[in-house]
Amino acid sequence: MSSLLGCLSSAARSLNAQSMGLAIVGQNIANVNTPNYARRTVDFGAVPPLESWSAGGGVEVLGIRSTRDLLVESRLGQELGYERAQSALADGLAEVSAAFGTARSSVDGALTAFFDAFANLAGDPTALSGRQAVLSEAASLAATFHDLAGRLGDARTDADTRVRSAVSEVNELATRLATVNQAMATAGAADTPQRLQYRDEQMGLIEKLSQLLQVQTVAREDGGFDVTFGNGRALVVGGIAVPLDTMRGEDGTTRLASQGVDVTAEVSGGELGGLISLRDDLIPGYLARLDTLAFSVATQVNTLHGAGFDLAGAPGQPVFTLGTVADGTAAAIAVNPALAGQPRMVAAAGSPSPGDNTTARAIAALRSARVLDGGTATFAEAFGSLVHQVGQDAATASDRRDGAAEVAREIRNMREAVSGVSLDEEAALMLRFQRAYEANARYFQSVEAALDILMQMVGR
């Protein structure tokens, strides 16, 4: 009788185990479309026999676990961070490229019109209309430099605004991860369904953090994750978040600080890394080249104009003023106020003689003079080189973004193969657990029937 009771207990234990298997299958199927959900599996183990001649105690549930490959998860985070960095660069550079406009619609066109005005003046050096055209085109050229410098400055400001937004998102994610870490630490050591749920949340938060900046993670014994960035700067330590602070730099841009230390230069990868590179490296580089072009145009024209003579035979004054502003020469260049509305003061002659056109011809000839890039480029070629560089940088960032996206897609597929829910596989498991449950139920009924017969015999 004791053996029959043991069989009954074994059957009941097996029914519970197969029921747990069905429950896990149902959980997996329910979360087939849940982001960051890792497929659950139930581990079974044979219950050892209590007596030497016993068949065994049946089966028991050893635990429930989620299927994850942390190496694949880490690699995916790296690729997603690189993709987001290149995406931020590509988006920002697309805005910068648009600021330059089409061919001959920006500085290149204004330069051509300006030198054409001096060429026309050389054809009729005594005409007031020609001098007025020179002043008008000079003002147009200065305005074009202003406009382009302003657009580049706006693009840099937009990148800075996005930096602040990304920092806020990083801090929010770090705080949430610290909270989950703390909950994980107090949930016990065993992989309970609650701990598995926390692990899903952790991996999702770490993936989002990886898209914002390049981070390193270290698993803790209590189930949490420590997160660092840059030169080992802490972002999350167990249940404590170490937020990034923002402060205003000397150039007016947002600087990042961790525990009072400026860490802007340490931030790499992710959207933040891409935005900082765009804001602090690429756009300032374009502005510097534009400033060089504006400075060279102004100084070359002013030098020749100052050596000439106006319609009254007086020495020429500077055509352009450069000013002193933090934004640079391109934003400060302007037509000399002394010449505004005074076309007679435009110098066309190389001597006090009114009919001389030497100066006008010399300034018109500047269009083909190789005075930039070490004497190898004209003004138009230097501007064209700048436009080409912007386009090339944008294309490179776009290609790298697409390449990283493809790599990330492949790694996602690898993760899906390990952690994803396959409806076909779950359907097969469901049928398997169902059949096992039915078989154990029949076995339970058979043992129960045998016990009833035995009890009837004893009762007689």
Image: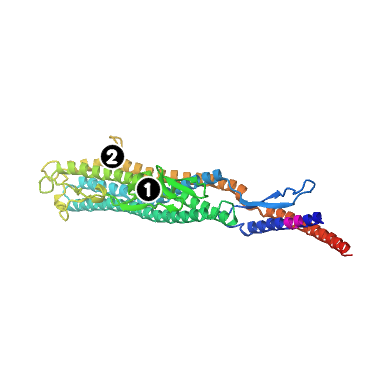
Q: Which residue is mark 2?
A: 368
Q: Residue at x 50, y 50 (%)?
A: 224
Taking the image as shown, residue 295 lies to the left or right of residue 270, namely left
Q: Nearer the viewer, residue 121 or 44?
A: 44
Badge 1 amino acid = Ile
Q: Nearer the viewer, residue 42 or 281?
A: 42
**Mark nearer the N terminus (1 vs 2):** 1
Q: Give the Cα distance between marks 1 and 2.
A: 38 Å
Asked if residue 430 can be seen in this view, the reply is no
Check residue 314 in the rendering and tell me which mark sits there, or answer none. none
| Count of marks, rendered view | 2
Taking the image as shown, residue 408 lies to the left or right of residue 102, namely right
Q: Nearer the viewer, residue 264 or 216?
A: 216
How crowded pointer 2 is (Cα within 10 Å; few <14, some 14-19, many 20+) is rated as: few
Badge 2 amino acid = Ser
Q: Position of residue 207 (x, y in %)?
A: 50, 50
Residue 12 within the segment the image draws in magenta = yes
Q: Which residues are magenta?
A: 9-14
Q: Residue at x 67, y 55 (%)?
A: 423
Residue 424 within the segment the image draws in magenta = no
**Quadrant for the C terminus in the image:** bottom right
Q: Which residue is mark 1?
A: 276
Disc 2, SS: helix
> Is most of the magenta stretch helix, strand or loop?
helix
Taking the image as shown, residue 344 lies to the left or right of residue 246, namely left
